[in-house]
Image (cartoon, rainbow, N blue to C red):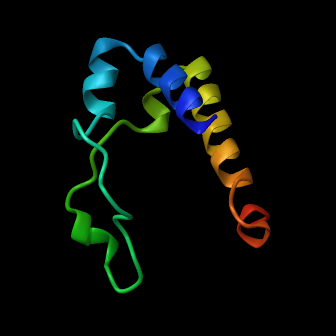
Amino acid sequence: AEEDRARELLASLSGGQLERAVIDAEAPNDVVLVPGVEFDALGEARGIAAAELSVAQRARLRALVELCVRNLRGEFAEA
């Protein structure tokens, strides 16, 4: 379900938005941030900001995030 929502969001992006949103041709093989790794170890922020999306695109993004959060363990989803 998450992949379907993500594909819907990507399909709604314009060419320029899509270029900025896709930061690598392949997804990482594992979790990028783990305990003990500083956030800035990832380098400069990349991607597209939610503020740069249209109202409809932000709604798709929110639906995707909410779906992912609902799939977390209860104590994390409620936070």
Please, is residue 66 above or below residue 20 in the view? below
Q: Nearer the viewer, residue 1 or 35?
A: 1
In the picture, measured across the screen, residue 36 lies left or right of residue 63, that is left
For the point 31% across and 45% down, the residue is: 27
The image quadrant that residue 47 belongs to is top left
Spot the residue most to the bottom: 36
The image quadrant that residue 41 belongs to is bottom left
Q: Residue 38, position in %: x, y?
A: 31, 78
Q: Nearer the viewer, residue 71 or 59?
A: 71
In the picture, measured across the screen, residue 60 lies left or right of residue 32, that is right
Q: Quadrant of the N terminus?
A: top right
Give the total of numbered labels. 0
Please, is residue 73 above or below residue 47 in the view? below
The image quadrant that residue 67 belongs to is top right
Q: Residue 48, position in %: x, y?
A: 36, 36
In the picture, measured across the screen, residue 34 lies left or right of residue 2, that is left
For the point 48% across and 15% down, the residue is: 12
Q: Residue 71, position in %: x, y?
A: 70, 53
